[in-house]
Image (spheres, grey):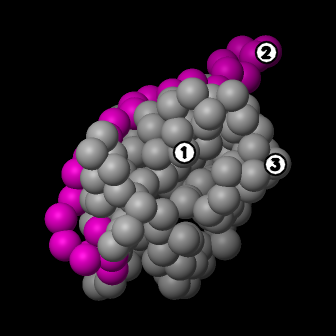
Amino acid sequence: MNSLLKLSATLGHALQAKHWQLALAESCTGGMAAQAVTAIAGSSGWFDRGFVTYSNAAKNEMLGVPSTLIDEFGAVSEPVAEAMALGALQHSQAQLSAAVTGVAGPGGGSPHKPVGTVCFAWAYRDSGGDTTVIQTWAVETRHFGGDRTHIREQAASHLLAGLLALATSR
């Protein structure tokens, strides 16, 4: 958890410097990234909100992820992760968002999506001139090893590291 806290603090400094807010959409991590972020004193200055959307219905109802997308690709997929990240921005005041959905195990895996398969997406709100556009920055799938706790910790860490890269690149 120490690495999550260090990442969160560094991310917080980067967001504060730009006066940006963050929104998170988490499934397999169950709010672990949001927990690390809110453990940082002063995070209310840069963390807008988090969505823990563990069920498919929650992804649809809270983030606007189309049921057809979940039916076609599965909840653990890059298209769903991307829709979650975009939905987090659409349902918040944040400038940056990230989403994670995966198979933490020990059950639930399949030959095509084994335990440890985790999909990520990062997005941002680009306000230029008279328009505001929400855009995807990156989407990827990673495969982590270890037990449920280790997979979830690796996923939360990767999610926050991606946010830090996004915050420092914009």
Q: Is residue 156 above or below residue 88?
A: below
Tell me: 57 left or right of 99. Answer: right
Q: Which mark is residue 28?
A: none
- Magenta stretch in the rendered image: 127-151
Where in the figure is residue 165, as x and y percent of width and height?
Answer: 33, 45
Disc 2 to disc 1, C-alpha distance: 35 Å
Earlier residue among tags 3 and 1: 3
Pick the front one: 169 or 1: 1
Q: Which residue is mark 2?
A: 130
Pick the front one: 43 or 105: 105
Q: Secondary structure at mark 1?
A: loop
Earlier residue among tags 3 and 2: 3
For residue 13, say whether it is visible: no
Tell me: 167 left or right of 42. Answer: left
Q: Amino acid at mark 3?
A: Glu
Q: Residue at x 44, y 34 (%)?
A: 78
Q: Are marks 3 and 2 in contact (CB under 8 Å)?
A: no
Earlier residue among tags 2 and 1: 1
Q: Which residue is mark 1?
A: 75
Q: Which mark is residue 61?
A: 3
Query: Looking at the image, is mark 3 or mark 1 nearer the viewer?
Result: 1
